[in-house]
Amino acid sequence: MIKQELMVVTKQEKIAEHIFQLTLQGELVSEMGNPGQFVHLKVTEGSTPLLRRPISISEINLEKKQFTMIYRAEGAGTQLLSKKKTEDVVDVLGPLGNGFPIGEIEKGQTALLVGGGIGVPPLLELSRQLVAKGVNVQHVLGFQSKSAVFLEEEFTMLGKTIISTDDGTYGYQGFVTDAIKDHNIQFDTMFSCGPTPMLKALERLHGHKPLFLSLEERMGCGIGACFACVCHTGDDPTGTSYKKVCSDGPVFKAGEVVL
Amino acid sequence: MIMLQVNLPGLSLKNPIMPASGCFGFGREYSKLYDLSQLGSIMIKASTQEPRFGNPTPRVAETEAGMLNAIGLQNPGVEKVVSSELVWLEQYDVPIIANVAGSQIEDYVYVADKISQSKNVHALELNISCPNVKTGGIAFGTIPEIAAQLTRAVKEVSNVPVYVKLSPNVANIVDMAKAIEQAGADGLTMINTLIGMRLDIKTGKPVIANKTGGLSGPAIKPVAIRMIYEVSQAVNIPIIGMGGVQTVDDVIEFLYAGASAVAVGTANFVNPFVCPEIINQLPGRLKELGFEHVTECIGRSWK
């Protein structure tokens, strides 16, 4: 159920260039469970910035009633968020959207998790839940350069992890699609989150296999009422059929929507 | 609550608070968060004759104390709105104001005829600010004679009172309001969004795909207050006010300016519980200000 709560900051840490990890505590966590969902944050009480910020959930701790998110402090809103300290409160609306369908993969099968940049965080909770289910997980995580890499250790503890950087300053040099090919990675189901060009390339190369993609789109309300984040469906690419990224997604099966 | 009751043409409202069209869908999303029967009314998303997908994304951009949007009237078409959305809304004890949009007069007439027959639709709101109209461009919202012609045509077919939503993108809002009143409109809703634009600092290109969009949110509240203040003293039909309402004090300011009821738009995106919160706060705030009934606030600013 969607709830709104003033949640308490328990930890805020800079973990890479412009990248922050924020842990919040509150009753709202008991509604979380599905990896790939997101929250909508109001970073100030005033009117500037006015709108909430959609940020993916990267870890859920039901026992401690805490969840963690990782975000890039780039615009005015996320920069304000990065200034929040322990015991400050943040206005959280969530959990929102439908996450990754972990029921689509069986125990003993292999899942390949492919992330790009700020699309990497939601894959961490996904990987943990898949490992807990007995799925073999492998990760290919793409970043722009060495200074932007984060969560490598956390993912490595869960399964084989390949880091790629666009400029080659760390790990494999090149795109995640090339890393998958060059390392000859085999898998039963792929789950991915990252920039749209990356998702398009993955759909083109691997869309014949079970492939689930988490999309990003500019949102207004985050709950499906404003029709800001609407996309065409794959079976009606120019017609009036649609899916809303915020409430029908953000995770879609490859081909379900037009990227 | 008795002190919040307001009666307008076609609308016996238990309170004067309602979500504005385009900011509430058809209510389904918000129904998961609270009981929609608490609302005075619901102004549902615009309906057109044919289903519309709307504009390419990105469709929204943030601004100082506001937002731009160019959704493009996305809706499933009037037949589906009547058979599905309005039937679903019947479970709630709330009168519906149906927003009617089109590209030419015949479209508006078609939609108004169909939708005004729905039993829970108690009033229409004519959307005359559509940027993509075929005949005369933006003329419906900016040329008084054409707005009056449209109002007359819709009044002929509508089973329920007709309110016309005024665009603020005009030289003289009072002339527009008077022309619409003379054409037989039962009420006005105002204001719609102001046309605006934002450019991306890195690319130099417009931030939203449609290039321009409608500015809403608290940034436009002073414009709305001024226009309602001017129009409400020049016409004899009631006004449902909107434009940047976020708080109970904003509502009272709109009533002071001359509105008889108030719609909440963009604030629903910021706080989805804003409408019931304002409804709950309104009686206490009215008492603090020395009012026994909400209607005592209406037009307090007038000369």
Image: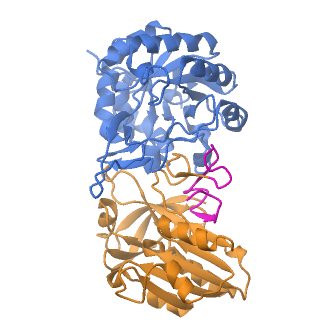
**Residue A59, visible in the rendered structure:** no
User: What's the colour of chain A in the image?
Assistant: orange
Q: Position of residue B11 (x, y in %)?
A: 57, 22
Q: Position of residue A114 (x, y in %)?
A: 54, 78
At 45% across and 39% down in the image, what residue appears?
Answer: B265
A255 within the magenta span: yes
Q: Position of residue A26 (x, y in %)?
A: 48, 70
Chain letter for the blue part: B
Q: Image quarter for residue B262? A: top left
Above or below, B223 against A199 in this view is: above
Q: Position of residue A125 (x, y in %)?
A: 55, 79
A223 left or right, relative to A211: left
**Residue A205, visible in the rendered structure:** yes
Closest to the observer, B187 or A209? A209
Q: How is the image coloured?
A: by chain
B42 left or right, relative to B204: right
At 54% across and 66% down in the image, what residue appears?
Answer: A200
Above or below, B221 against B198 in this view is: above
A175 within the magenta span: no
Closest to the observer, A145 or A77? A145
At 54% across and 46% down in the image, what residue appears?
Answer: A225
Q: Which residues are magenta?
A: A233-259
Q: Quadrant of the C terminus of chain A?
A: bottom right
Above or below, B144 against B167 in this view is: above
A236 left or right, relative to B281: right
Overall secondary structure of the magenta stretch?
loop
Above or below, A147 against B69 in this view is: below
Q: Quadrant of the N terminus of chain A?
A: bottom right
Count up the numbered dots. Answer: 0
